[in-house]
Image (cartoon, helix red, strand yellow):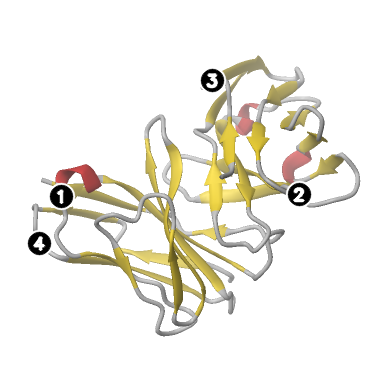
Amino acid sequence: EAQVTQNPRYLITVTGKKLTVTCSQNMNHEYMSWYRQDPGLGLRQIYYSMNVEVTDKGDVPEGYKVSRKEKRNFPLILESPSPNQTSLYFCASSGIGGGQPQHFGDGTRLSIL
Amino acid sequence: AQSVAQPEDQVNVAEGNPLTVKCTYSVSGNPYLFWYVQYPNRGLQFLLKYITGDNLVKGSYGFEAEFNKSQTSFHLKKPSALVSDSALYFCAVRDTNAGKSTFGDGTTLTVKP
C-alpha cells in the first residue's frame, strides 16, 4: 500500500529537549515536504526537498532542521523546541512536477511544555 | 509570491443540496491548483487538480471544481451533498517547479441530514 508514515503520532515533551519526527514514504517520490497546521492558519510549509541532499526553506523554517540522506526518508528535527512549536505536523511526498498531487501522512501532534 | 484565500471559515448545507466552497489565488505565471480534504485525525487527501485544459475539472467522490482565470478563482462544487462530505477542505497552489506549496486556511463543510 502506498503510504507516508510519520512517527511518533503524538509527543509531549519539554522546552529545549531535542526531538526528531521521522517521515518515510514507499512510493519512490523525489519530492518531500513538512508542514505545520495551526487553527485558523491552514497549513504552512516548513521545509521541502526536491531530491536526496537537496533541501530548501518553506515559509516558516525558523527553529527546524531537516535532512534528506535517503530518498524515502525526510526527518524533521527540532534542536531546541519551544512552546510556540506546539502544533500538528504533516509530512507529504509527491513525484516531481508542479502538477503532481501530494500524499500526506496522518500527522504528528507535538506539545512542547 | 503566491497566495490562496478561502473566504469562508464554514459552509453549511443540507443533504441533497448543491455545495460550493470558494477559493481565490494569486500566482505569477500559470497556476497549478489543488483541492484536498481532511477528515478528523487524518492527513489531507487529494480531491482534484487543475493544470491546464478544461476549466471544469472532475475529481474524487463526485466533486468538481471550476477554474476561472479572469476572477483568479477555483471553487469546489458538488451537485448533491452527502452527510459524509462533512470535513475540512483546503485549496492549494503549487509553483511550477514543484517546490513551494501554499495552502488556504481551510473551510469546514458541514452537511446536515
Residue B71, disc:
none
Amino acid at the residue labelled 2 = Asn
* Picture coordinates of residue B26, whole percent (x, y): 65, 37
Q: Both on one chain, marks 3 and 1? A: no
Measured Cα–Cα span from mark 2 to mark 4 = 43 Å
Q: Which residue is mark 4?
A: A17
Measured Cα–Cα span from mark 4 to mark 1 = 9 Å
* Picture coordinates of residue A78, whole percent (x, y): 22, 62
Find numbered disc 3 in the image and state the secondary structure of the residue it sits on. strand
Report the residue at 63% width, 52% height from top.
B94
Find numbered disc 4 in the image and state the secondary structure of the residue it sits on. loop
Q: Provide the chain ID for the residue under circle 4.
A: A
Find numbered disc 2 in the image and state the secondary structure of the residue it sits on. loop
Q: Determine if residue A61 is in view.
A: yes
Q: Which residue is mark 1?
A: A82
Q: Earlier in the sequence, mark 4 or mark 1?
A: 4
